[in-house]
Image (spheres, helix red, strand yellow):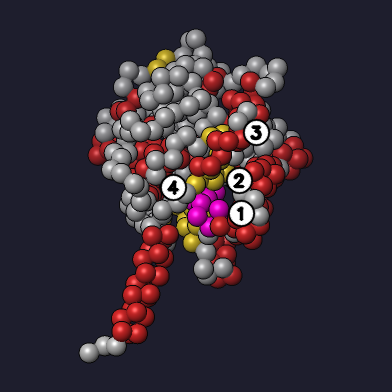
């Protein structure tokens, strides 16, 4: 018969294991998000509201029409991946940093979102030196990280408190880097030149991760790039060109998708190096590319009966995308059933497509290492709003 001390040792071991699994399973007390339009829940909208600049098209209906029934600053008809994560954890709203900074500091307990529409990983000065100017923001990843460090003392009191806060936070590192390619591609830069940016972008992302780990971050989800060759915008820009080749299985642009895969490969190499140096930190790669390729290969299987390549809202043309007639322009058109489309406005996805990505990443197998089930205090059906969650804009 085992001694009482043995039972006590086993009990302590099981309690420690339980505590570890609870943290590993995602019982997070807050969410900290960085990134661009795939994650921005209102930062750029707030920036524009505080300025005299004319607002861009995505600050007008029909943006936000499906779920929020009002414009929120999200570049979609409804919720984004970050919304589904927070909803599962019953953390909504995860407030945009710029609104909190200028309004109510008491709302930051559940975390903050620093993502900004149009943001790049590299600073604006780099792209301007290449002759490419950001039409929306200079809030690069370094700027967002600076914002975070400035407001961190408002989230915690002592250095120990801040480490504890970050250890129990889910850090979403983007997606970031996509606009470092989008802006120059649209400006007409050749792919070979843009490819030279990749190591610089990866180094910038990795440096931000190292800095967050030093501050106490314990779990970081780092998304890769989407298959940009399937974007309605790029399919329109390259439409009819004899210099491009389309994938027979998806009708996507092969060269641009290979470029996205190159970025993702380089990112994963960098993440492996971070894991080697910080084996006790959960550095999770989110495979946006292959999660999205599911519905690009078989759109009907995911309810996208109107396909995955044509935009729901746009200015016409073979993919309902027009550089001169954006979604929300008076002469643009919007589909009646956005849930049957994967693409929303040419560059961004619909709420339905983001929901597929969320399920594939955070409830499926498209993360490395696999992200365990997010825990929640009640049974919230993700995809439908819980009555206990209040959205405030």
Q: CA distance from mark 3 to mark 4?
A: 31 Å
* Residue 162 numbered mark, or none: 1
Whether residue 318 is visible: no
Q: Who comes first in sequence, dot 1 or dot 2?
A: 2
Disc number lying in front (1 or 4): 1
Q: Which residue is mark 2?
A: 155
Disc number lying in front (4 or 2): 2
Disc number lying in front (3 or 1): 1
CB under 8 Å between discs 1 and 4: no
Q: Who comes first in sequence, dot 3 or dot 1?
A: 3
> Residue drawn 26% across and 88% down?
2
Given the current orientation, which residue lies at the most extreme top position?
330
Q: CA distance from mark 1 to mark 4?
A: 30 Å
Q: CA distance from mark 3 to mark 1?
A: 19 Å
Between 219 and 357, the one nearer to me in the picture? 219
Of helix, strand and loop, which one carries label 2? helix
- Magenta residues (range): 165-173
Label 4 environment density (alpha carbons within 10 Å; few <14, some 14–19, many ≥20): many
Label 3 environment density (alpha carbons within 10 Å; few <14, some 14–19, many ≥20): few
> Residue drawn 33% across and 33% down?
386
Q: Which residue is mark 3?
A: 101
């Amino acid at each position: 018969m085992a001694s009482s001390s043995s039972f006590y040792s086993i009990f302590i071991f099981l309690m420690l294991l339980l505590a570890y699994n609870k943290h590993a399973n995602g019982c997070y007390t807050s969410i900290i998000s960085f990134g661009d339009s795939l994650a921005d829940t209102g930062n750029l909208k707030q920036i524009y509201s505080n300025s005299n600049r004319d607002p861009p098209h995505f600050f007008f209906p029909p943006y936000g029409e499906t779920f929020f029934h009002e414009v929120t600053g999200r570049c979609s008809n409804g919720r984004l991946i970050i919304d589904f994560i927070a909803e599962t954890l019953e953390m909504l709203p995860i407030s945009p940093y710029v609104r909190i900074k200028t309004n109510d500091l008491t709302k930051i307990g559940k975390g903050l979102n620093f993502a900004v529409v149009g943001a790049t990983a590299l600073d604006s000065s780099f792209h301007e030196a290449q002759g490419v100017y950001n039409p929306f923001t200079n809030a690069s990843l370094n700027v967002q990280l600076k914002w975070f460090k400035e407001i961190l003392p408002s989230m915690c009191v002592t250095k120990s408190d801040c480490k504890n806060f970050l250890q129990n936070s889910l850090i979403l590192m983007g997606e970031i880097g996509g606009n470092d390619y989008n802006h120059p591609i649209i400006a007409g830069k050749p792919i070979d030149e843009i490819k030279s940016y990749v190591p610089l972008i990866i180094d910038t992302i990795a440096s931000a991760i190292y800095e967050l780990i030093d501050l106490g971050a314990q779990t970081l989800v780092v998304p890769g790039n989407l298959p940009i060759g399937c974007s309605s915008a790029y399919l329109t820009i390259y439409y009819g060109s004899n210099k491009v080749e389309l994938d027979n299985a998806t009708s996507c642009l092969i060269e641009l998708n290979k470029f996205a895969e190159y970025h993702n490969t380089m990112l994963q190499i960098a993440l492996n190096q971070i894991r080697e140096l910080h084996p006790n930190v959960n550095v999770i790669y989110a495979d946006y590319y292959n999660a999205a390729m599911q519905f690009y290969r078989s759109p009907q299987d995911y309810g996208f009966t109107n396909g995955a390549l044509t935009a729901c809202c746009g200015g016409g043309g073979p993919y309902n995308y027009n550089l001169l007639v954006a979604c929300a322009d008076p002469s643009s058109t919007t589909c009646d059933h956005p849930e049957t489309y994967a693409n929303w406005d040419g560059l961004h996805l619909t709420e339905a497509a983001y929901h597929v990505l969320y399920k594939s990443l955070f409830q499926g197998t498209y993360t490395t290492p696999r992200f365990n089930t997010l825990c929640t205090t009640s049974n919230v059906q993700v995809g439908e709003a819980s009555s206990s969650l209040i959205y405030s804009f």
